Image (tube, rainbow, N blue to C red):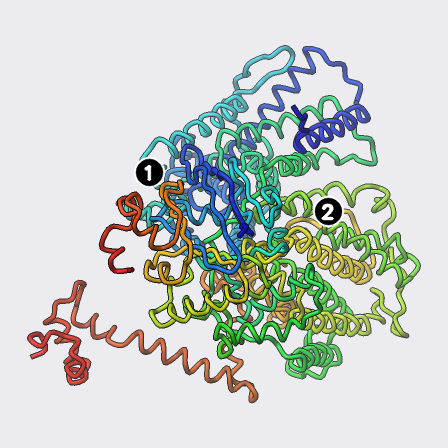
Amino acid sequence: MRFKVSPRLISALVVALIILFLINKNWGGASVNAKTISSFLVVGIALGGIYAITAGGLVVTYATTGIFNFAHAAIGCFLAFCYWQLTVKQGLPTLVAIAVTLLVIAPAIGFLLDRVIMRRLRDAALVVQLMVTVGLMLTFMGITLTIWTPKTGRSLPQFFQSSKGIQFGDVTATWHRIITVAVALLVAVGLRFLLYRTRLGISMRAVVDSRSLAGLTGAKPSIISGASWALGCMTAGLAGILIAPETGLVVDNLTLIIVVASAAAAIAQLKSIPMAFVGGLIIGLAKSFSAVYLEWGKDWAYADEAIPAAILFIALLFLPMARLETGKIRITKRTERLTKPWEAALGAGVMIALVGAWANGWIPWISGTNFGERSAVWLGRGAGFMVIGLIMISLIPLIGWAGQVSFANYAIAGIGAVLFSHFGGQNGDALGIVWVMLVCAPLGLAIALPALRLKGLYLALATMAFAEVADKVLVRHPNMLDPSATGVLFKPVNFFGITISSDPSDRKAFLMFLVVTFALLFFMLEMLRRTRWARRWIAMSDSPAASATIGVNLTTTKMMVFMLSGAMAGFAGCMFGLQRGALSVDSFPLFAGLPLVLLLAVQGVRYPVAAFMGVIGLATFPALYEVLGKPSWLSAIELIGPGIAAIAMAYRPEGAVFYSGRDLAGLLPWRQDAREEKALAVAKEREQNIGKDEINDMGLTRPFTADKVAQLDRVLDITDLVDEHKMVPTGGAS
Amino acid sequence: MTAILRTEEVVVRFGVLQAVSQASIEVIEGRVTGLIGPNGAGKTTLFNVITGLQEPTSGKVFFEGKDITNKNPFKRARMGIARTFQKLEVFGSLSARENILVAAEQRKTWDRSGYDTSKVCDEILAKVGLSDVSEFMVGTLPTGTARLVELARALALNPKVLLLDEPSSGLNEEETEEMASLLKTFVDDGLAVLLVEHDMSFVMGTCEFIHVLDFGTIIATGTPSEVQADPQVQAAYLGTETVEEAS
């Protein structure tokens, strides 16, 4: 018999060896005895319980709605604040407050979300589904921060805070923690039972597989999906209430649990609730093990924070490869045509002209303010927006064409910025930009590698985890950013006689340099769209199965686009560094990277011009503040902006650029085709609506009787026509 | 005549359900081979096994004498196996021409004959009658036309074997006839065609050889008339009426 070594076994051994090596190298010297073991277990299990509840809720929402809800923890956070308001502030008894929060507010949010947004996302592209929930996450964070401003400290008491808890050796497990773990376990078992043993639960899962088929069984899909979202929000609230006393009522902390919970959910393959519980425990125990036994040294002081991401990446290695599914393609009925080279050149020219006109004060109607006068501050801000635009445009081929939803590009740009401060930026050497791009290209690939053979959602999870690690661990290594070196890190760079730097005197030149580069990239992408590369990426995104069967190697095709996007993000990073001048370790938080993906998705992630629209979008609120003062209604709009964006995406999934392009293209003198098409579409719609009003007026319901049809014919004045074709029995028409 | 493509006792199990059990079929160059059977008989699953989208539980697939059971789908395509899908798998956000262009360009990775992709594209567009709609996004085309795009895309690979999964569904009578004569021209060029189809008159009119699948098992093989005469086939699937209608 031939001995066969499975690749999984090899990977498992390699991973185990790496972990052992890391443990050995960073062993803190704490002796392994009953005392440390019990503290490791007690803390680990308590922490694990926290993650497990959130992960369980995530998995339930995904299993019953088909949507991975990044807003899960943010909703939980909001509900925890509601609970605080009811108990601590209003003084309601604990049980009443819990009941109101979990049985009234949470389901209400769930039903509302389903009704207004989620229902429309069932057949939406992955990027739309994900970005809508990201938008909701930012909105819930914003609302919570506005209602309960962080200036006042708040805290939630633990359950049974006054009693002592149970003693394990030298360690006390507080009642709150015991309750947390017990509830996590109960939730896992209960949800599992609900989903697999009750009629409601089975209907919930069935609705995800096939809405129409599930409808045939007598379940009402709209009520079922509403119930699913209500249930999801209830688990989120439960988790929030239990976690908040441990982490503090801090919006960021409570919301970021989503990253950890995602890792646990990935271990559960996004479907098994008991495994989500196990996943939560694994992460909790790993973190507690590291806290009790390991000492990471001052260079890797924050390595702890990388544990969930590391576990996620390991889990991805062992997930079974995704099957190439058929019969699942979404076809959007949309018409567009390729942008012609001269049109792209014209577009690029318009971008340069617009920014140039603003920077030189040729747009008179906003003068009299700092924005209109283009103070050095505003020129700097303008450059900042253009830099973000460069990051956004790096996402067009990746997300828009190849359909690979990545949240990592802001982090890659951050790492690019830091690297540039070592690779030449410190001496004003422009060649350093090339080195940075050469490093960022494989970096972009490396982040994606573990998720390449899996469903697209895993890539989103992996890139989000990476963004968190880059922010919390990588850039904080002293060799990356020296915490003591504050001040300007970059010397001015000379490009063909133009000096670009963060100096006030150079800012206008820098802004113009950025817009020209941006316009060039825009033009380049529009040209790339006409080549076989872009065609292949789009084909792969439209139907992976069909692409494979025409000989496309999906893995290498994806690798190419990740490298391209990574290099572009690296370039954006260098500009980021030059524009800021100085960098600090908290320059690249995850929550700063998410809105720009959202902004781009709202504009339409397939179209390079969307990145420019994104830049304008970024500039809008600061500009309005400058012109209008700072009215509170405007702040409110800005705050719920992501939510509005999320709703807009649910109703207009192709993005603003597509819809406005469709409506406005006809205005261009040379777009006769667009005018004809519009006329055709209008005629078609009118044809479909013929008789609709009349049917409503007559109060007709199906099935139509011959008499009613004849009556309708008379109302519509088409009796003769119909008779001629003998479509209605003659008896009815008389 | 040796078979260019054959499966050997292919078994596919989904949990307790045996979708395909011990199915052995042969596809021969220069003729249309039919694969018929009632809904859920395992026809599409067998297609997926042949093209590598579905890993068989056991059994083997041979192409030109080589065992390709463990090869990636894209490698099989590069060897010369092309297919269409029962449920449309077009590239909806590319134009009809681009759909074919992607395949024609892809062929460059293994076909070194130095053909001109653009010319190949235009020829195939003309052949299947899509020249008029070549610049439209495929997502906006009616199903029947989109089906032709899929066919054209498969042809652009210049395959040795063409697997067609219900090519006539979504086509009207006239278009079905055109499809049938189109298939004739393919096999005249030496192509091997394997056809899954529900339209019996289409099958009986086009196929020279037929495999009948029922509950995952091949219950009959032979020429159309042999298959129609087979009592097992009649009982399991065709029913007397359909046979009469087809003959």
> Which residue is label 2 attached to?
A446
Of all chains, the one bearing label 1 is: A
Q: Is residue A287 visible?
A: no
The label nearer to you, 1 versus 2, is 2
Of all chains, the one bearing label 2 is: A
Please state the total of marks drawn on the protein image.
Answer: 2
Amino acid type shown at disc 2: Ala
Question: Horizontally, is A54 left or right of A416 in the view?
Answer: left
Looking at this view, is A614 or B10 the one in front?
B10
* x, y percent for residue A223: 32, 47
> Which residue is label 1 attached to?
A200
Q: Quadrant of the C terminus of chain A?
A: bottom left
Amino acid type shown at disc 1: Leu
Q: Is residue A599 visible?
A: yes
When asked about the image quadrant of residue A506, the answer is bottom right
Identify the residue at image location x=63%, y=55%. B78
When asked about the image quadrant of residue A570, the answer is bottom right
Identify the residue at image location x=79%, y=30%. A296
Q: Is residue A146 above or below residue A474?
A: below
Question: Horizontally, is A150 left or right of A504 in the view?
Answer: left
